[in-house]
Image (cartoon, helix red, strand yellow):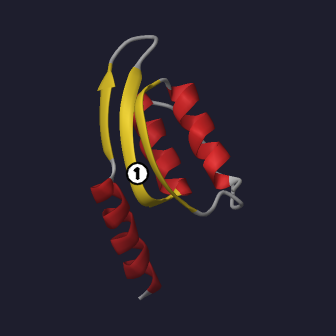
Amino acid sequence: MKRMAVVVGMIACLGTAQAVAVPGPDARASFNFKDARVQDAIRLIAGQYGLNVVIGKNAGGTLTASLTNVTAEQAMATVSEASRR
């Protein structure tokens, strides 16, 4: 039952996030998150930019954010800041 709740939560989160990227060394993308788990937002951003990440157990909470035309560094910094609040 717990596993099913996690899967449903992940699908719901991914369904509310949109990503559009422009390839290149200074790649930029736009993301829209609504009540997304911070861990899922980090995974989505990392996947969009092709980054490898390790997410600590302390990364938690949810966020609602609209990030437009941001670099990987800007996106990660914004999500990281939101997780501290």
* Residue 43 x/y as whole percent: 48, 47
Can residue 28 be seen in this snapshot? yes
Q: Amino acid at mark 1?
A: Phe
- Where 58 falls versus 5 (above or below)? above
Left or right of residue 66, residue 75 in this image: right
1 or 20, which lies in front?
A: 20
Q: Callout 1: 10 Å neighbours few (<14), some, many (20+)?
A: many
Measured as percent of width and height from the top left, residue 7 is found at 37, 71
In this rendering, is residue 48 above or below 12? above
According to the image, label 1 marks what residue?
33
Image quadrant occupied by the C terminus? bottom right
Q: Residue at x 42, y 45 (%)?
A: 44
Residue 34 occupies which quadrant of the picture? bottom left
Q: Residue furthest bottom?
A: 1
Q: Residue at x 55, y 55 (%)?
A: 38
Image quarter (top left, top right, bottom left or bottom right) of the N terminus? bottom left
